[in-house]
Amino acid sequence: MLELNFLEKIIFIGCVQFFLYFLIQKLNLKKYFSQYQGIQKIHDGDILRIGSLFLFLPFIVIYLIIIEFKSGSFFLIIIFSSIVIFSTILEDIKHFLSAKLRLIILFIISFFYVLLAELPIIKIASIIIDYQNNIFFYFLYILSLMMIMNGFNFIDGLNGLSSFNFITIFISIFFLANLYQDEEIKNWSIFLILLSLFFLVLNFPFGKFFLGDSGSYLYAFLSGSTVIMLFERNSKLPTLLALLILAYPITEIVFSIARKSLQKLSPMKPDNLHIHQLIYNKLNGDKKFRNNLASLLMAFFWLTPIFLVILYTQTNLNIIQLYLIYFCLYTISYYRLSKKQFY
């Protein structure tokens, strides 16, 4: 492997990703893609939804050449990240995977990852739950991963929104890893933050490429699997802290399922009533301006991991109290946006 210092690694990551950008431009891949016509579409033009390639291909190249993560947990994440991409990217190319089929795919991926991964002991406050040989807790992890992947897919739609949230999730993971002196997870977090930042340059504010479903699922899987690994390696951390690190995508899917159920609609049926879309609809101007501005106005939500984790470590508030405060603020914001004019 190459021996590179931090600055050289940044330059190397940027070169790999921008080489890929110019290669995709040169190949004119649009002719192979079906035009996206989903109800959530809030942009003009036919823009490629292949952001996952800007994350995954450099991710593999850079890991093989310059990143030295010895633990088998990192290798397992890479293997399953590959499966996530290859099993869902057809939806971004041809748009023929139904919601039910995607749910089945996510279940299979989550099931086998949880089966093979080193899971942390479930620790809530001072209570330690021994889940060994208890199938309920395995399915709890499976359900959690599936929720995160669907939650990330729900929040995708504005330029930069998913990337902003992904970056803040890994900043909070870095903060906790630094607190417990876990150098490998600190380096892993920096690596993924840099990958996401370079894609963000292409996505926000110019919208050259979109993340796509495969990119959303990749973001979510990397977030969820890294959180699992963080707790497995640092047993003093309460596993419920995942609720704060992943608060935005978790709240988005829980709130969306509850909202649709109250309206007697199928939770799997897509709509354009997520909170970021409500903000977008309240703004004036052309679509690109509204898209970018709405993403910035969502800062309270995508900055959540940093604020909540710092508050947890620096105050006497417990995890449940912090999450309930966040959930109440989310609910109030949603109600006001859905009922009143936004200024």
Image (tube, rainbow, N blue to C red):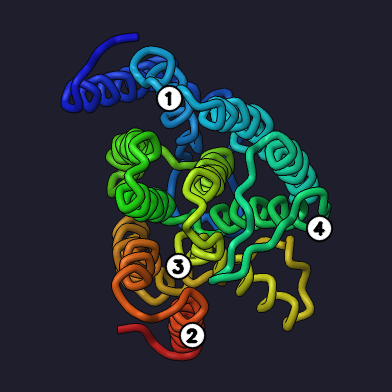
Q: Is residue 206 left or right of residue 234?
A: left
Identify which amino acid the numbered label 3 is placed on: His
Which residue is the extreme one toward the top? Answer: 1
Between the residue at mark 1 and the residue at mark 3, the CA separation in whole angstroms equals 36 Å
Q: Which mark is residue 136?
A: 4
Q: Position of residue 98 (x, y in %)?
A: 76, 46
The residue where tag 3 is placed is 276
Q: Nearer the viewer, residue 77 or 266?
A: 77
Closer to viewer: mark 1 or mark 3: 1
Identify which amino acid the numbered label 2 is placed on: Cys
The disc, 4 or 2, on the residue closer to the chain's N-terminal end is 4
Are there few (<14), some (14-19), or many (20+) residues within 10 Å of tag 3? many
The residue where tag 2 is placed is 328
Quick one: SS at disc 1?
A: loop
The disc, 1 or 2, on the residue closer to the chain's N-terminal end is 1
The residue where tag 1 is placed is 69
